[in-house]
Image (spheres, rainbow, N blue to C red):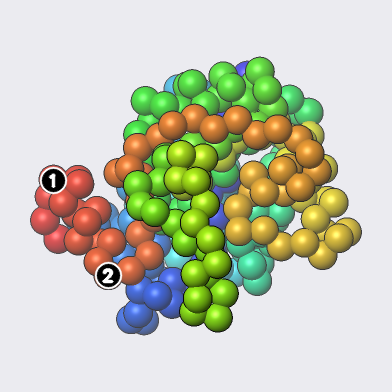
Amino acid sequence: MQATVLIPAAGTGRRMGGSVSKQYLELIGKPILAHTLALFENHPLVDNIYLIVPPNDLSYCQQKIVDQYGFNKVRRVVAGGDKRQDSVKNGLDALAEDGLNQPQRPILIHDGARPLFDCNRLSILIDIVCQTGACTIGVPVKDTIKDVENNKITGSPDRNRLWQAQTPQGFQYQLIKEAFDQAAVDGFIATDDASLLERLGHPVQILEGDYRNIKVTTPEDILIAVALLGGSR
């Protein structure tokens, strides 16, 4: 079964500074968001993409991103919510309205500001999701991590057991829908989608990704992304 991709890009990017949301900043001649969409537009195992953006940006994204760059797999541009979790839920609701809510359908959720994901890993990720129900891309941490409270170190977790979560994160539709529904009932807010399944006791596999798969969050990240893409601003 082909995968459906949700791309939440409804944040304002306050850490980036400036008046333009980070997903629209130019990266080697195209907006960051256009680079991200192209990853999935060109993959044969992806059938539909749902782009989730700020409510006031719906027309802009349709015209200046989807239409201008010819993203034919973008089925809908969806209004995001106050938090990322709300935005992803809106995307899940939209694909259900379009009849893409088969229980075992692979749903991939990928940050709009991660334009450097290596899509050679996508087929493996989808296969693991089909077999196990849930899998996320990630990389082992390189640095020593400290637990800190009131500016004092309280512990040093074993680095060999620590991974940095990335996206895409993939789930069978029924599992991620149930996880989002339960989080809404409990008032639980997570920093990533896999956490919603973890708290319900459902195992989530991890597939080693690539350290190049950065999330463009600060001005320095733009410079790194340009260098990794081998271009110039």
Q: Is residue 12 above or below residue 206?
A: below
| Crowd around label 1: few <14 · some 14–19 · many ≥20 (10 Å) | few
Residue at (20, 46) in percent of width and height: 228
Work out whether 226 lies above or below 11.
above
Residue 141 coordinates in the image, percent (x, y): 40, 46
Q: Name the amino acid, label 2.
A: Pro
**Left or right of 13: which side holds 225?**
left
The answer, for residue 48, to whether it is visible in the render is: no
Quadrant in the picture for the N terminus? top right
Query: Foreground residue, 191 or 47?
Result: 191
Q: Is residue 128 visible?
A: yes
Could you tell whether 185 is left or right of 63 in the image? right
The answer to whether the residue labelled 1 contacts the one labelled 2, judged by CB atoms less than 8 Å apart, is no
Mark 2, other Cα within 10 Å: few <14 / some 14–19 / many ≥20: few
Task: Judge whether 28 appears above or below 149 on screen.
Answer: above
Q: Position of residue 165 (x, y in %)?
A: 50, 46
Q: What's under tag 1, amino acid-wise?
A: Gly
Q: Secondary structure at mark 1?
A: loop
SS label for mark 2: helix
**x and y percentages locating residue 189 in the rendered image:** 71, 62
Seen from the viewer's position, the closer of residues 149 and 30 is 149
Give whichever of 225, 61 is nearer the camera: 225
Q: Which residue is under mark 2?
A: 219
Task: Name the mark on residue 160.
Answer: none
Label 1 vs 2, first from the N-terminus: 2
Q: Which residue is mark 1?
A: 230
Cα–Cα span, label 1 and label 2? 17 Å
Q: Quadrant of residue 106?
A: top right
Task: Kindly identify the residue that appears in the image at 31 percent across and 58 percent down.
Answer: 31
Q: Give the residue at x 35% y 37%.
A: 210
Q: Looking at the image, which residue is at 49% across and 69% down? A: 153
